[in-house]
Image (cartoon, rainbow, N blue to C red):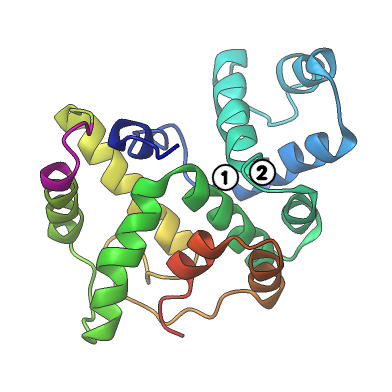
C-alpha cells in the first residue's frame, strides 16, 4: 500500500536533534533485547539518559527507539560501538528513514544546492521546500508557526551535527563523505532511500 502524504510528512522531530550520546544508550538497550519492564527501569527509574524529568526521558527515549527501529541490529551496533562520525551518520540514516520530511529536503533541495555550487543553506530554502510539499501533497498537516520554526531549527542542527553545514548560524555547505561503515550497511541492507539522501556530493 502506498503511504498517504499525511503519513509521509510528520512533525516528528521537534522533540530532539540527533541525540547521538543518548542514541548509543538506547541502541545498547535494544541490543540487549530488554522487555517493557526493563525499558521502564532503565529509562524512568535508573535515568539512563540523564534527563531532568521522567517525562523528558521517556519522550526522548521513545523518539530515539522509533528512529532506530527503522533499521536492524547491525546499524544499532554501529550506533552503540562506532566512532563519533560513524555513530552520527548511523543515527542520521535512521532519522531520515523515520522522518522523510528531512530526507526529501536533502534529496530534492540540498542536493541541487551542491550541484549548483551554492555556498549557503538559507532559511528560505526550507520554507520554500515546505510550500512546495504542500502544493504537491494535499493531505500534508497544517503546522503552527512555532512548530514550523522548530522543524527548521532541528533540521539545520542535525545537518550541522552530521557534517553538511559549518554551523547552524552561517550554514555554509560542506562536502560530506558518508562513513564507509554506514554506507556499506545501507547498501547491503538495501536502504536505498537513506543512502541516496546522504550521498549528496558523491
Is there any visible trace of residue 157 in the rendered image? yes
Task: Check disc 2 and report the residue beneath it.
Answer: 23
Say whether residue 45 is left or right of residue 163. Answer: right
- From the viewer's side, name the closer residue of 123 and 138: 138
Local secondary structure at mark 2: helix
**Marks 1 and 2: in contact by CB < 8 Å?**
yes
Q: Residue furthest front?
A: 1
**In which quadrant of the rendered view does residue 177 lie?**
bottom right
User: Which residue is denoted by mark 1 in the rendering?
Assistant: 19
Vertical position of residue 78 compared to residue 16: above or below = below
Disc 1 residue crowd, few under 14, some 14–19, many 20+, Cα 10 Å = some
89 lies above or below 58: below
The image quadrant where one finds the N terminus is top left
Front-most of 92 and 4? Answer: 4
Residue sitting at x 64%, y 34%: 65
Find residue 61 and report its horizontal and vertical position in percent: 63, 29
Identify which residue is drawn at 67% across, 59% down.
87
Q: Return the x and y of residue 170 as percentages of the image width and height.
A: 25, 68
Determine if the magenta segment contains residue 169.
Answer: no
- Judged from this view, the residue extending furthest toward the right is 32
Above or below, comparing residue 158 to residue 57 in the picture: below
Disc 2 residue crowd, few under 14, some 14–19, many 20+, Cα 10 Å: many
Relative side of 23 to 81, left or right:
left
Magenta residue span: 134-140
Estimate the spatial distance between the alpha carbons at disc 2 and disc 1, rounded to whole Å.
6 Å
Q: Residue at x 59, y 16 (%)?
A: 53
Amino acid at each position: 500500500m502506498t503511504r498517504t502524504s499525511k503519513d509521509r510528512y510528520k512533525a516528528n522531530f521537534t522533540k530532539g536533534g540527533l541525540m547521538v550520546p543518548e542514541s548509543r544508550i538506547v541502541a545498547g538497550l535494544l541490543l540487549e533485547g530488554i522487555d517493557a519492564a526493563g525499558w521502564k527501569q532503565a529509562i524512568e527509574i535508573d535515568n539512563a539518559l540523564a534527563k531532568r524529568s521522567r517525562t523528558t526521558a521517556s519522550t526522548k527515549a521513545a523518539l530515539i527507539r522509533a528512529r532506530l527501529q527503522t533499521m536492524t541490529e547491525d546499524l544499532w551496533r554501529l550506533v552503540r560501538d562506532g566512532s563519533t562520525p560513524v555513530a552520527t551518520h548511523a543515527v542520521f540514516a535512521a532519522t531520515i528513514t523515520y522522518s522523510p520530511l528531512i530526507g526529501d529536503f536533502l534529496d530534492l533541495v540540498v542536493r541541487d544546492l551542491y550541484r549548483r555550487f551554492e555556498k549557503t543553506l538559507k532559511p528560505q530554502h526550507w520554507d520554500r521546500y515546505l510550500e512546495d510539499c504542500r502544493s504537491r501533497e494535499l493531505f500534508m498537516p497544517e503546522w503552527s508557526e512555532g512548530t514550523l520554526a522548530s522543524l527548521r531549527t532541528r533540521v539545520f542542527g542535525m545537518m550541522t551535527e552530521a557534517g553538511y553545514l559549518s554551523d547552524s548560524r552561517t550554514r555554509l555547505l560542506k562536502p560530506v563523505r558518508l562513513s564507509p561503515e554506514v554506507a556499506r550497511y545501507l547498501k547491503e541492507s538495501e536502504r536505498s532511500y537513506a543512502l541516496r539522501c546522504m550521498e549528496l556530493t558523491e
